[in-house]
Every structure is written in structure tokens, then in C-alpha cells.
Image (cartoon, grey):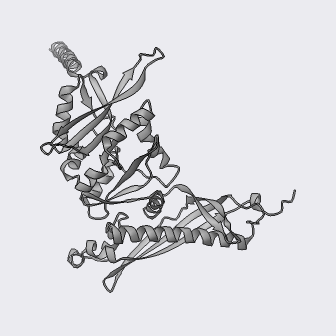
């Protein structure tokens, strides 16, 4: 009896295995999308233009297989319908699991993205790490430009992700964070702002959102401040001026310290008072060789100039986002909410109305690291 059961079990196992193999889709039967582009179409009946940048293996030159890309665009009423239309036109089924970027035109972002962003976030094929980009021009045009720059366009979309690890003038904006910010009540969403410049594409700066609409854009320096205030800062190079010789700039390397940025939010006479304590490390990269930067007095002067740069930059950034864009992209509301023990107490205050009135106090400190290379006289 046991032998009979074992034989039946083996037969069933083989049957299931062959059935799964029959249903499985081979990689040759799939087309992989590297990036998704979304624009406003010219059709009033089908207001969305969906573009997919699809990878194509190419071995025509005889030197091995390389990856090229092609872009396909359809006009549609929704992302799901657009995907269905593209799948009808494409020989192989389109797969989104290798998509590294969702590119939305600035025109569409300012109109509002509510109609499709939830669908994208809930698509099981799209990775939550896929970055959100806002393009100054049409998304379809940016995809065409990216294809002309790289044999594998995914290299381009990954390049600014890697840049964020070594320079804090760039940041990443993964889909999962963007979606969470849209549906949370702590901070407003941001996306990477990108534009073409000659034969290149630059991804420096941020698109600022309020609810589902883009309300403004920020520079690379603003992104530097954003990273410091959200404790995402790694390192960056800035220029300040030598108090002894204001015509000659000092190149300064900034890096994060063990102390994170500390934020305090209070309400005084109906006005939010926001204090940010920033701690960084700094070192001089290049400077006037005739000035001795090893003395304590010189170090204090340079540290003061660095602190002034950080204070002025962050204050300007915060005033613009609060007064002009009225969007709390840092998430100060989370600190504000901690002041109240009950929801009833918190409900008496509308943060969206309070934040544009906010006053900021930036308190930066940095420790300047110097060495014998910047001493005026070397003693061998």
C-alpha cells in the first residue's frame, strides 16, 4: 500500500512540474521596459500619452549581444488601458519588472497625477525602488534623448542614483516614498527634476508637490539643504570665501557627522517657530597657499564662513518652500504633532494654514579638519 501511494505521489509531482513548465513564460517571450513616460496627449478623448522605453538585444554587429532601446507611445484614458494597447501592438508581452524610472512631464505633473499614480504604485511588476522623475520637457522626448546617450538606457537612470551616494546635490525619490508621502500627513512628496542641456541630461534639483500637483521646483543647492535637513546628507563640495582675501574662494568638502540634524517645532502666538541644529564635518580641498590655515584663529574664521553658508542656504530654501510653495517637504509636521497628547488638542490646529507663517532658526556647527598641507611654513 505504501509503495502504491509513493508511485502515485511521484506521478502527481511530475505532472505538476511539467504543467508549470508549460505555463511558464521564457525570457525570450517577454519585452522588458526600462522606463515609463507619461505626458498630456493632444487628444481630448484620450488625455494620457504613455511611452515605454523597451530593451532590445542586438547582435547584428557580430561583436556579441548589446542592448539597444526603442520607444513606443500610445494615447489612452488610463495607464492600464495604455499597457493593454501596447501589449496588443508588441510581439512579446511587456514586462515592467526591470523598469528603473517613471518619467512624468512637468506639464502633466502641474495638472495633477491622481488618475494614474495609485495604479502605478499598486502594479506588482513595478519595483518600489523605481524612481520618480519630473521632466521639464515631454517625457517621450527625454526617453528619446536617453536612448541616444547610452546603449543601455538603464545606465542613465542608475547614474543619478549612484551620484546621490557621493554628492548631496542629488537625491533619490523611490516610488514607495513618493506614494507614502502622497497618502500620509507628515510631509509633502518630492521627485527628481530633470532636463536636457545640450547633448546631455541633468538630474539636479527637486520637483515640489502639494497633494497630487507639482507646485514648484528647486535647485541643486536646495537639494543639498533638503538632504541636510532630512538627515540624508552624505557629502558635498561647496565654496566659501577667505575672510583674509575675499576674492579667492575656498573649496570645502562637507560630510555628515555622527550627530544628526535635530529639529524642534513650537507654536508661539499662532506662528510656528522651527529650530534646526545642524552638525557637519569639513575640510579644505584647495586654498591660497600663502595663508596659514593651521592656526586656531584661521580655523575659526573658516568655520564661521562655512556656518554662514549653511545657514543662509537653508534659510532661503525653507522660506521658499513654506512661503512660496506652502509645502512641508521636510516633514516638520511630525515634530509639531508631538507637542500634543490627544487628537482633540491636535485637531484645533491646521498645519497647512500654519506652515506658510513659519519662522526658521538655523544653528549650524562644523568641525574643520586641517593638516600640514595648509601650513604657511613647512618644517622638514
**Image-quadrant location for residue 72:** top left
Percent of width and height locating residue 130: 34, 43
Instruction: Give the answer, above or below, for where 285 lies relative to 309.
Output: above
Residue under the image location 47 percent in, 68 percent down: 314
In the rendered image, the vertical position of residue 127 relative to residue 345, given as above or below:
above
* Between 19 and 198, the one nearer to me in the picture: 198
Question: Percent from the top left, x then y, of residue 102?
Answer: 31, 43
* Residue 354, above or below 330: below
Q: Residue at x 38, y 64 (%)?
A: 330
Q: Measuring from the top left, give residue 172's x and y in whole percent.
A: 41, 50
From the viewer's perspective, is 169 left or right of 29? right
**Residue most extreme to the left:** 45
- Please say if 256 is above or below 132: below
On the question of residue 111 being in view, the answer is yes
In-front residue for pair 146/301: 146
The mark tally for this picture is: 0
Looking at the image, can residue 124 be seen?
no
**Residue sitting at x 20%, y 43%:** 42
> Where is residue 67 drawn, in percent x and y?
40, 26
* Residue at left offset 35%, top offset 44%: 129
Q: Residue 14 falls in which quadrant of the image?
A: top left
Q: Is residue 281 left or right of residue 293?
A: left
Amino acid at each position: 500500500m505504501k509503495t502504491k501511494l509513493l508511485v502515485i505521489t511521484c506521478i502527481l509531482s511530475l505532472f505538476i512540474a511539467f504543467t508549470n513548465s508549460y505555463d511558464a513564460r521564457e525570457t525570450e517571450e517577454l519585452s522588458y521596459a526600462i522606463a515609463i513616460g507619461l505626458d498630456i496627449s493632444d487628444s481630448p478623448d484620450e488625455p494620457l500619452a504613455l511611452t515605454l522605453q523597451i530593451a532590445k538585444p542586438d547582435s547584428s554587429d557580430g561583436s556579441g549581444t548589446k542592448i539597444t532601446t526603442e520607444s513606443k507611445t500610445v494615447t489612452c484614458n488610463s495607464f492600464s488601458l495604455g499597457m493593454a494597447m501596447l501589449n496588443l501592438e508588441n510581439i512579446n508581452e511587456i514586462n515592467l519588472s526591470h523598469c528603473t524610472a517613471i518619467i512624468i512631464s512637468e506639464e502633466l505633473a502641474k495638472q495633477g497625477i491622481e488618475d494614474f499614480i495609485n495604479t502605478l504604485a499598486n502594479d506588482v511588476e513595478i519595483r518600489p525602488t523605481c524612481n520618480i522623475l519630473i521632466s521639464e520637457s515631454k517625457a517621450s522626448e527625454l526617453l528619446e534623448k536617453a536612448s541616444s546617450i547610452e546603449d543601455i538606457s538603464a545606465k542613465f537612470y542608475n547614474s543619478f542614483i549612484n551620484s546621490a551616494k557621493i554628492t548631496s546635490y542629488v537625491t533619490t525619490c523611490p516610488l514607495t516614498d513618493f506614494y507614502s508621502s502622497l497618502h500620509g500627513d507628515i510631509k509633502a512628496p518630492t521627485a527628481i527634476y530633470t532636463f536636457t542641456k545640450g547633448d546631455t541630461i541633468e538630474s539636479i534639483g527637486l520637483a515640489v508637490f502639494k497633494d497630487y500637483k507639482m507646485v514648484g521646483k528647486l535647485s541643486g543647492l536646495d537639494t543639498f539643504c533638503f538632504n541636510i535637513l532630512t538627515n540624508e546628507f552624505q557629502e558635498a563640495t561647496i565654496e566659501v570665501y577667505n575672510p583674509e582675501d575675499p576674492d579667492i574662494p575656498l573649496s570645502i568638502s562637507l560630510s555628515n557627522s555622527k550627530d544628526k540634524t535635530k529639529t524642534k517645532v513650537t507654536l508661539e502666538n499662532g506662528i510656528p517657530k522651527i529650530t534646526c541644529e545642524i552638525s557637519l564635518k569639513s575640510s579644505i580641498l584647495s586654498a591660497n597657499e600663502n595663508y596659514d590655515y593651521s592656526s586656531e584663529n584661521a580655523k575659526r574664521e573658516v568655520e564661521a564662513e562655512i556656518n554662514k553658508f549653511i545657514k543662509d542656504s537653508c534659510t532661503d530654501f525653507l522660506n521658499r518652500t513654506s512661503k512660496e510653495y506652502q509645502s512641508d517637504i521636510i516633514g516638520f509636521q511630525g515634530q509639531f504633532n508631538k507637542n500634543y497628547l490627544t487628537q482633540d488638542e491636535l485637531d484645533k490646529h491646521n498645519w497647512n494654514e500654519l506652515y506658510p507663517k513659519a519662522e526658521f532658526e538655523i544653528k549650524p556647527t562644523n568641525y574643520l579638519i586641517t593638516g600640514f598641507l595648509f601650513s604657511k611654513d613647512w618644517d622638514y
